[in-house]
Amino acid sequence: MTSLSSLKFTIIIPPKPQKRARSATKITKSGKAFTMEYKDPDQRLEERRMINLLLEHRPPVPFSGPLMFGMKAYMPIPASKSNKWKQAAMDGLVRPTGKPDLDNLAKNIKDVLKGIFWVDDSQVVEYLPGFGKYYGAPARWKLEIRIWQPPEVKIMVATTYPDVCFNCTGPVEPKNYSLMAKRVKKKCPLCGKEFECLEEP
């Protein structure tokens, strides 16, 4: 497992959607027909180009476990537009609303990242803020991968008297604990009641 917790990088290549798989009907020697699907040759070529650019950013081993994924696909700015429109597009005031659609772009890049940056697409449990299509020059993919972490646990405990229950110490400020903290039961020496709190190892 890699010790990295996140990666952020850019590859300079115009974002493209994933082409549909092609199909062909084959007939066996016994006369039975079956349909075989295969990748479009242009899709294979595009994936090889992307992989060549991605390899310099890859982790030592693919990430495992749940991941958060950020993608900004910067599409080419139409040459026919006015300079004012182009500047607005560069400033993010105009966004691409035509083809390709966002889902198809995401599927294409995620399929290429699979096996290099993570084991399987199902590991992506959350998209990072800003995930979307933009205009930009040069046209490019801006990508970010983070290991998902559960939020820190907060619990009301006594900080001055850690072995005394909440009722006997009065209100105290919440304390942040690491993911290694364990919930334990203790007996209050003042009132004799059991209470729960977190303890660091």
Image (spheres, grey):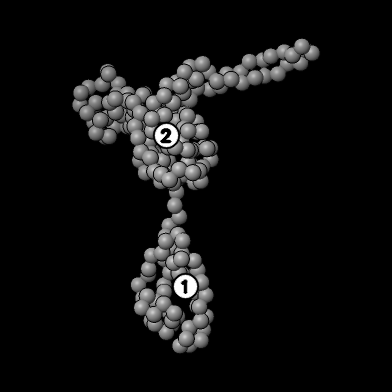
Q: Position of residue 120 (x, y in %)?
A: 53, 37
**Residue placed under numbered mark 1 in the picture:** 197
Give me the residue at 50% from left, 68% from top.
183
- Which mark, residue 58? 2
Q: Nearer the viewer, residue 57 or 96?
A: 57
Residue 26: % across, % down:
69, 14
The answer to which image quadrant residue 170 occupies is bottom left
* Closer to viewer: mark 2 or mark 1: 2
Task: Assess disc 2: are there few (<14), some (14-19) or many (≥20) residues with their C-alpha within 10 Å of its C-alpha.
Answer: some
In this rendered view, identify the residue nearer to me: 19 or 29.
Answer: 29
Residue occupying image coordinates x 48% and y 25%: 18
Q: Please identify the residue farthest to the right as the structure is shown.
A: 30
Along the horizontal axis of the image, is 154 left or right of 121? left
Q: Is residue 34 above or below residue 155?
A: above
Drawn side of residue 157 relative to residue 37, left or right: left
> Which mark identifies residue 187?
none
* Element class at badge 2: loop
In the image, is residue 84 above or below residue 69? above
Residue 166 is situated, as x and y percent measured from the top left of the image, at 43, 79
The amino acid sitting under disc 2 is Arg
Q: Residue at x 44, y 26 (%)?
A: 51
Q: Callout 1, which amino acid? A: Cys
Mark before the other along the chain sequence, 2 or 1: 2
